[in-house]
Structures are given as C-alpha cells and as structure tokens.
Image (tube, rainbow, N blue to C red):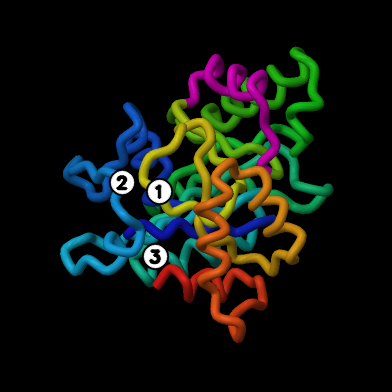
C-alpha cells in the first residue's frame, strides 16, 4: 500500500523516484523498478504480499524542516522538501547550507515558486519568474537538476501546468487529498493524508473538486461516527 503523507502549510519516496515512477501512467512501488497496477483498494490494503510505502513531502522551506529531516532519517523514511525562493508570508526560509544538508542526507529538494503566489492568477511573465527562475536559482545553489515542483497552495490550471512542463520539470504535486489510486497525472500528483487539522469545509471542497464523487463518498461514509473528527488522524485510521 502507498500512503502519501503531506504537511500542509506537503508524499512519496523521494520526488525523483516519484517522478520516475509516474512516467507512462505507472507507479513503481520499490527501488528495483517493479510496477504496481490499480487494484481494489480494500484487497490492495489487505494483501500481505504488497509492500507498505510511506512517502512524505514538506512545503515552504522552513528552517525547522531540518529537524523534520532528522526525525525522518531516524525512522528511515524518505522525504521531499519543496522550497520557495522567498519565505512564505515573509517568514524565514532555509538557507543554502540547510538545503545542501538535506541533499547530503539523501532527501530531495523540489521547487515551490519564488514568492508563493496564486499561480493561475499570474501573467505569462510572472509564471516564467515563479517557475523557471525558481528552478534555475535552486539548481545553482545545489549544483544539480531539480525534477519536481509543488504548486503553492495547490493552485494550478492548464497554463500553469504548461509552464511547469516547459521549465523542464517531470512532475508536480498538488494538495488534493484522500487519493488511493496508483495511477495519476504526474503533473497533478495528489496526496492521501495531510498532517493538518483541516475543517469539514476543506474536505467538502476536496470532495466536490475531485471528480470521483462515488469513490470519495464511499471513503467518507466508511468513517465510524466516533472517528468523524475530520482530522488527518482519522484519515490515517481509515488507511490502516
């Protein structure tokens, strides 16, 4: 079973692995390139022969992400850290030494824009700056190519996706929740669990915009009444 965990406010093996896994609408679930095809979610989760993969990603480049990296390393978990050029809401942003430390520990760095804007509201010139300039500057700092992008606040449209493709990224993560399928558009990569106390309205919006009402209704109605706190913890329970 694949259980992506996203910190809102962030899923997978490293994003490099993730991007490779999703090319051709297939998903490799282990390091040797084996592929998994969609199965019934209940039988897939229950199978003793399926690997359990917990993947994580973390947005906004907060300096405290270095502490998260240490905890992930202690638990032998991979993570992708999506870092903007400027700190979100003028907050501190991890410096180059911090990014190099993450890279040296084997964590992947992904791009997250320059100033964390609503990308669908940007004009063509702004999109180039937010997507291409961000990629170039991070690559200069790390002396390596970046392959993954995370849309600020998950906001994207066809123009934004086209810009991300032109910049040379091979995939991009959204903030769509409760995903369980193994096949998805690599430029609309969803999450399963988000470590954030979302409101009922957030889950309702996700339900209405997901496009698969029958599947999501089935997931939500399976939550026992005692667990319907709509927190990420109760979603974790339904995925175990």
Tag in front: 3 or 1: 1
Residue tagged by mark 3? 73
Residue tagged by mark 2? 38
- Residue 61, compared with residue 45, is above or below; it is above
Asked whether disc 1 touches disc 2, contact meaning CB atoms under 8 Å apart, the reply is yes
Q: CA distance from mark 1 to mark 2?
A: 6 Å
N-term-proximal mark, 3 vs 2: 2
Q: Which residues are magenta?
A: 154-169
Q: Is residue 28 magenta?
A: no
Whether residue 143 is visible, yes or no, is no
Q: CA distance from mark 3 to mark 2?
A: 30 Å
Disc 2 crowd rating (10 Å Cα; few below 14, some 14-19, many 20+) is: few
The residue at 51%/31% (across/down) is: 187
The residue at 55%/80% (across/down) is: 224
In which quadrant of the rendered image does the N terminus lie? Answer: bottom left
Residue tagged by mark 1? 181
Whether residue 37 is visible, yes or no, is yes
Q: CA distance from mark 3 to mark 1?
A: 27 Å
Asked whether disc 3 touches disc 2, contact meaning CB atoms under 8 Å apart, the reply is no
User: Foreground residue, 2 or 144?
Assistant: 2
């Amino acid at each position: 079973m694949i259980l992506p965990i996203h910190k809102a406010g962030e899923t997978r093996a490293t994003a490099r692995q993730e991007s490779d896994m999703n090319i051709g609408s297939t998903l490799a679930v282990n390091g040797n390139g084996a592929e998994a095809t969609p199965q019934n979610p209940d039988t897939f989760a229950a199978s003793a022969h399926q690997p359990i993969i917990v993947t994580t990603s973390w947005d906004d480049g907060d300096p405290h992400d270095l502490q998260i990296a240490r905890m992930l390393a202690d638990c032998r978990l991979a993570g992708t850290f999506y870092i903007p050029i400027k700190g979100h809401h003028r907050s501190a942003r991890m410096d180059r030494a911090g990014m190099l430390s993450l890279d040296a520990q084997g964590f992947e760095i992904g791009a997250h824009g320059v100033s964390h804007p609503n990308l669908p509201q940007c004009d063509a010139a702004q999109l180039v700056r937010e997507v291409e300039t961000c990629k170039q500057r991070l690559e200069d700092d790390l002396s390596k190519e970046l392959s993954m992008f995370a849309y600020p606040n998950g906001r994207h449209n066809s123009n934004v996706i086209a810009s991300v493709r032109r910049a040379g990224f091979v995939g991009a993560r959204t903030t769509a929740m409760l995903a369980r399928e193994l096949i998805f558009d690599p430029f609309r990569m969803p999450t399963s669990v988000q470590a954030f106390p979302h409101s009922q309205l957030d889950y309702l919006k996700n339900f209405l915009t997901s496009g698969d009402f029958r599947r999501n209704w089935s997931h939500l109605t399976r939550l026992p009444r005692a667990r319907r706190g709509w927190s990420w913890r109760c979603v974790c329970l339904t995925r175990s």
